[in-house]
Structures are given as C-alpha cells and as structure tokens.
Image: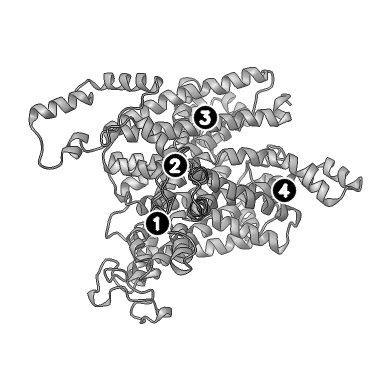
Amino acid sequence: MAYRKPGISMFQFIFRRVALTLPTFVALMFVTFVAVRLVPGDPIEARTGERGIAPERLAQLRHDLGLDQPVWKQFLDYADGLIHGDFGVSIVTKTPVLNEFLTLFPATMELAVCALLFAVVFGIPAGVLAAVKRGSAFDHGLMMVALTGYSMPIFWWGLLLIMFMSEYLGLTPVSGRMDLINYYFEPVTGFMLIDSLLSDQEGAFGAAVAHLILPSIVLGTIPLAVIARMTRSSMLEVLGEDYVRTARAKGLSPLRVVGLHALRNALIPVVTVIGLQTGTLLAGAVLTETIFAWPGVGKWLIESISRRDYPALQGGIMLISGIVILVNLLVDLAYVAINPRIRHGG
Amino acid sequence: MADDQVIDPSGGAALIESVPAELSSFRAFWNAFRENRGAVLGLVVVVFIALLGVFAPLVAPHSPIEQFRAHVQQPPVWAGGGWEFPFGTDAVGRDVLSRLIYGARISLGIGLSVMVVSVTVGIVLGLASAFLRGLVETVVMRIMDVITAIPSLVLAILVVAVLGPSLTNTIVAVTVVYLPRYVRIVRAAALSELSKEYVVAARVAGVGRLRLMFVTVLPNCLAPLIVQAALGISDAILEAAALGFLGLGAQPPTPEWGAMLADSREFIRAAPWIVTLPGLAILVTVVAINLMGDGLRDALDPKLRRS
C-alpha cells in the first residue's frame, strides 16, 4: 500500500514509486535467466529425442540457439532482447514467445476478467449486507462461507463442480472455450465472447458463456472471499465514523446513508484489494486452465516446462510477472489518486 | 468469524494506534483465545488431524501403498462398500482411509517445515535489513519484491522445474514463495521498535548488536509474526497440494492429498469418492488452521483485544 512520508510532493512520490519498479524488473530478468539456465535437461536433447543427431548438426543447433556463447553473453543478449520487445523464440514451435503469449493471453484475460466480475458482483453486496446486519445469522454465515472460500483448494473445487454440474446435471460443458464441433469461426479479438457475437452464428455466444461459467466460478472463489471480507471490515469501520452518524441524525434514509455516504468511502481499500488480486488470478489461472483444458497462458506455461522450452518458460514468466508488477503499480498510483488522505499528505 | 471485533489488519490501519505488542502471560492469551469458539474448534480439529498423522501407523487400518487387487475401486461404507475399507479403495485397490491418514502426516509436515524454515530465514533477513539498513536492506527487499511480483504458483513451479519434483523440493519451493511476508513483517516491526526508548536505552547501556537484535527487539516483534506463521501453514499446505496436483510435488505412490486428487481425475464418473475425500481433507485442515489463526490474531494482537 502506498504510504507517503510527509514532506514530499505527490509528483515526487509517483516518481519514486515508478523508479522503484525498475530494479525489480532487472532483478526479474536475472532471476528468470538464472533459474531457467539451471533447469535440468538439455532443450536440444528434449527435441531430438533418444535417437540423437549427428555431432555437426548438434553444434549447428547449439550455435543457432546461442547456447554455445558464454553465459554472461547469453544474459546480455537476453536483456537486450527484452528491452527491444524480443522475448526469444520458442524452441518447440519456433514462433516468437511474445506472439505465442499474445495469442493465448486473451483467453486467460477473458477468464480472469469474468472471474473478477463474478467476485465483485457477489462479494461487494454480500460484504455490505453483512456489515449492515452485523452479528446476524447472515453475517456469521457469510463469514463462514468466506473463510471456506478463502481456504478452498481450487483444483478440487473445479473437479467437484465438473462432477456435479457437468457429469451429474449435464448443465455445463466439461472443458475448453468453445463447442468446436458445432461452431467454428476465425479469432478476431481473441476474446471468445466478442468473437462469437461477431461470427453471427446462432447459439455461438451462448456456448461461449456456458464454457466460461465453471472456470470463472472456480477462479473467482478466492477473490470473492477476499473481497467480501474486505468490504465487510471496511464498511464496519466507516459505519462507525462521525459523518455517517451525522447523516443518520439528519434523517437520511438508511439506504442513502449506506449506499451513498458510507459505501463510497468504504470502497477505497476494497478497490486496492481488487487490484491486488491480479497475482492471485494469474496463479489461479494455471490450475483452472489445467482442469478445464482452457487454452491460456497458465496451461501453456505448465506445458513448456515439460517440453523443456526454456525461452517460452523464461518469456512467459517475464511477461506474466511484468503484468503483475505494472498492475500493482497502477493500483498504488490509483490509490494515491482516490485517497485524499494520501493525496493531500495528511 | 465468531468475533465481531475483527478488523482486517490491512484495512483497519487508520483506526489502530500503535501499541507495543506484548506477550504478557500465557494465561491472558489463553483466556482471550478461549472466548473465540471458532478458534477453539479449529484448534481441536488441527490437534485431531495432527494426532492422526503422528500415530498414522497405529491408526490406519492398512498400509497406504499396499494394493488390494481384489478390491479395486470399492465404494465407501455409505455407498454400499464394506467395513474392511471404510472410505473405499482407489483405482489400484489402495485403502483410501489409510492414504488420507498418512497424507495428514505429509501435508502437516510440509506446512510445519515451510513455516519453521521461512520464519527462521525471515527473522534473520528481516532483522538484518532493519538493523544494517543500507545496501543489505536494499538488496534483501528488492529480492523480496521480485519474489512477490511472480505469481505464487508460477514461482513455485519454476523452483520445482529447476530442482526436480519431490517432496523436499516442494518444501523448498513453497518456502521461497512465502519468505517475503515474514521478512517484511519482521523488518517493519523491528523498524518501529528501533525508534522506541527502550531500544535507545539498551543501546546507550552498551548492549551488543546481536543481543539487541535477538534479545531486546525480536520478542517485541513476535505477535504479528506468530499470527502470520499460523496462517502461513495453511497457505503452504494449499500451495503444496496444488503442486502435487500438477504432478510437480510428491511423487507416486506417496499418499499426498494433492497427488491423490491428480490420480483421481479420470475416475470422476466411476469413483467419485476418490475425488471427493482428499479434497475434503485439504479443505477441512486448511479451514481449521485458518480459524485457529484468526483466533490467534484476535488474542495476540493487543490493538484488537482492547476494542
């Protein structure tokens, strides 16, 4: 969270906060480079299989991939490439890692956004209601559910939902993003919800929604619990403030007091917490995508480990972590912008 | 949560005045803890599961890895199975109940090991950053920033990919992932203690640096650390189970709960109990630890205790 020492201007604060992310990026490059270098197994071996290849061909391959260079040179090349937007070329598919990532990322983003929407739409009202009816059965019940959600092994939760909703009730599809037997259309935006609408095929949009329901619930469960708890505690705090008592004393309707006066201020920390869910969502996406065979970056990352695809692993982790760092930076800056106490250096 | 006074520490920062944390007496703590019914329930469940794990060889009806070929995928007692295998058997005829009991040993073992190692390393790095400042602090905190920037599971996967999948490496991976929070808590607590008069007094009295760090300051940083450590056990168990599920954790035939789930995926239709029970074991354990951790927080945190 962004706390500011008194005596520095907002501009200085923002500058410092942005500058602090640069060493993090450099360290991240170093960590991914070193870690991936330490992974056992040779990428060439993984590609040629057990039969092996001629020594000249092997040397040629090693040269092409830059593996014959000294390690420090490899790192500098890697860092230089990253700065110029070159995240390497996948050893397996021979396409640039950035392209692969960008092709798959919309799937992950679509899933993450829907999961977050699910969490916000249910989490905030539930938290507000629990705070208003503090101590009631609803409050206790919700907090118990939130604790359960927070403690949920989401890979099991996904299997349970598949077992019940798909296998037993037959309501939702088991896996994937689209019913590919009935519908086929070229990706335009990469977002299935939008592409299915653009395709003009009847039922395609419904199929896309149906495929999204279970994965969104699974991925959104932990953020839902976090948001509900946060909203409740933030709301409880605000409801005890003087201005809320004043608003009540003025005779404003409870709905107006809670909805207008209290909620607006209670939401400030909630918005921060929502922003900080990016990491949780992307980590959860690895599991969710694996369970539902969702073709996103999480599943791709796991697969690149088993394929010993160094550049894909390296680039993928760089890109995913870069997104998390940037979103957290934006959240911090947004927090400064919306919280007057920090903005005015109070 | 049973106690309404609970305010999330990250949200209630503005309300809370800074009061030195003190572990005055165990009795005061226990009285506060006892008031929270959920926390006591959590404690009872955790102790029960821990005892099951410790005495697994005595409690478990069968060996966790013995394959009863004549009883493959036998349903549990409530679904028409027999008492010989109360929770049924898995796809190769191993007793599910015995595997779950031995799994308690593994999961709690991972949780505790991760907690002990990361708290120890966290204390050392956190105190070092707070006392030495300068380059040490910058380097340590930048590294912690990088670790936090990589999504937890992705980092754990990276560590396991480097070291190879095994139970020990799962512990290493999860420890690395959860290290930053301990370092940060210790550093922040130590920094706020350092400006206090008793520390200045100790310094003036000529107390050596190491003694100042570990004897004078550290005990006053313990309350938030203990709370985080308790909650950290449950996070570690979840993370380790996720790795096991992805096939990057404990290897077969180890009866690790996450790995058991991974084995069961193809039997969703045929043998739902193999899917349901290990997950339920993870959930119950983690909920119990979290309930206990919430109670610990309310009891140990004097700021909240007063309200």
Between label 1 and label 2, give the one nearer the viewer: 2
A173 in relation to A219, above or below: below
- The residue under label 4 is B306
Chain bearing tag 2 is B
Position in image of residue A281 (x %, y %): 50, 44
Q: Residues within 10 Å of mark 2 (few under 14, many from 20)?
A: many
Between label 1 and label 3, give the one nearer the viewer: 3
* Element type where label 2 sits in the image: helix
Residue type highlighted by circle 3: Leu
Distance in Å between CA atoms under marks 3 and 2: 16 Å
Say whether mark 2 and mark 1 are on the same chain: yes
Distance in Å between CA atoms under marks 1 and 2: 18 Å
Position in image of residue A63 (x %, y %): 18, 23
Whichever of labels 1 and 2 marks the residue nearer the N terminus, that label is: 1
Q: Which mark is residue A9?
A: none
Whichever of labels 2 and 4 marks the residue nearer the N terminus, that label is: 2
- The residue under label 2 is B152
Distance in Å between CA atoms under marks 2 and 4: 35 Å
- The residue under label 3 is A326
Say whether mark 4 and mark 2 are on the same chain: yes
Residue B81 appears anywhere in the view: yes
